[in-house]
Amino acid sequence: MEIRIRGVSKHYYSEGKTIKALDEVNLTIPANKIFTLLGPSGSGKTTLLRCIVGLELPDTGEISIGDELVWSKEKNISIPPEKRGLGMVFQTYAIWPHMNVFDNVAYPLQVRKLPRDAIRESVAKTLRFVQLEGFERRPATKLSGGQQQRVALARALVAEPKVILFDEPLSNLDAKLREETRKELRAFLGKLQITAVYVTHDRVEALALSDSIAVMRAGRIIETGTPKKIYFDADHRFVADFIGRANLVKATVRAQEDGHTVVDSVLGRIVCQRRDIAIGSEATLCIRPEFIRIVEGAAQARSNRVNGRIESLVFVGEAYEAEIRAGGELLLAKIDPEAKLNEGDAVSFTLDPAHCLLVAI
């Protein structure tokens, strides 16, 4: 079920000031995909989610779910949340502690006054799907955090919604459980083949779960794309920096040659992946830490060889995280954990042009 958002704005008023939670948002969320709204706190992602659900009413614009217009200020259309055919999983799970697992999951169907046999059959099928078969009579408060999250998912799915929405549902779990639940959730949603809208500020969550990501800032959509497009080929400095750790270096475009863009920077002359930026223009060179390659001895690189010195070296298990001073810049690098290096060592490293990204300042 496709979701279309056109010209949606939402303002709040506090202490005589107007706060733009959403600022003329235009977005199409494709059907049967996992679509993530990613951004820092205060970027408007949860407000946009709540507008889709109907828990918030925009000040301007239109929202359509499939062929149905569910909100239009101009046409005076406002379909209530319970009639939009949506399921929602909240950050706090919203599991009722006085109910067992069966009653928590069955509640949406009981409200609709479905026959008992139909409710029992639907709940059993949904609990099998989320791997909680046999937990029907277990008190909700006796479940682990991951199990409670699956109960919340089952309750959102039991009524077979057209769209399911998630508001930072994994933020209350510890790191290991969050990783496990993320994998489960991706598998569940892949089997369902329904539209899922997922809100998070966690870039790893967004990259691991999503088919598409919209990065938000100050109530606006800054950029939309696949996880790989957003990570490897962002168009904006904010997006490149927010989606992952990045070294950002000022540069000036000097040439367009051999399918590459060549820039001057404090690191020297750097050959980058092609960007249509005018010669003489200022830009930002974005280099991910994992693409800084240490070279040994007299090994020759065709381009982008830089000399520097290690200022700090921290072992983090799968790699060393190093800070390398080069051309006055302090660059973060990920280095092979078996490398024989020490703080203070002079090093040379290379930068693959395919991973030298130029973004707008």
Image (cartoon, rainbow, N blue to C red):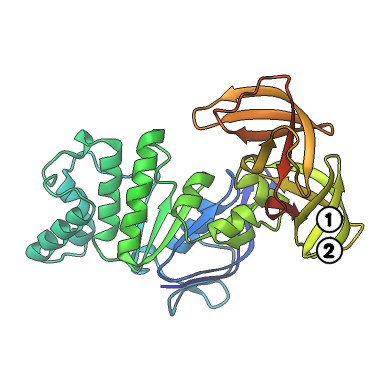
- Image point (66%, 20%), residue name: 342
Mark 2 near mark 1, Cβ–Cβ under 8 Å? yes
Residue that lies at the very extreme toward the left in this rendered image = 117
Let me know if residue 92 appears in the view: no
- Image point (51%, 75%), residue name: 76
Location of residue 122 by image quarter = bottom left
Residue type at tag 1: Val
> Measured along the vertical axis of the image, is residue 172 above or below residue 228?
above
Residue 287: image location, x then y, percent: 70, 45
276 left or right, relative to 28: right
Residue type at tag 2: Glu
Most foreground residue, 237 or 335: 335
Whichever of labels 2 and 1 marks the residue nearer the N terminus, that label is 2
Residue 125: image location, x then y, percent: 16, 60
Give the CA distance from mark 2 to mark 1: 7 Å
Most foreground residue, 13 or 98: 98
- Image point (60%, 48%), residue name: 243
Secondary structure type for disc 1: strand
Residue 321: image location, x then y, percent: 61, 29
- Classify mark 1: residues with Cα within 10 Å, few (<14), some (14-19) or many (20+): many
Residue with the mark numbered 1: 262
Quadrant where the image shows the N terminus: bottom left
Residue that lies at the very extreme toward the right in this rendered image = 280
Residue with the mark numbered 2: 257
> Measured along the vertical axis of the image, is residue 323 above or below residue 213?
above
> Measured along the vertical axis of the image, is residue 357 above or below residue 100?
below
Which mark identifies residue 78? none
Let me know if residue 243 appears in the view: yes
213 left or right, relative to 277: left
> Measured along the vertical axis of the image, is residue 86 above or below residue 150?
below
191 left or right, relative to 224: left
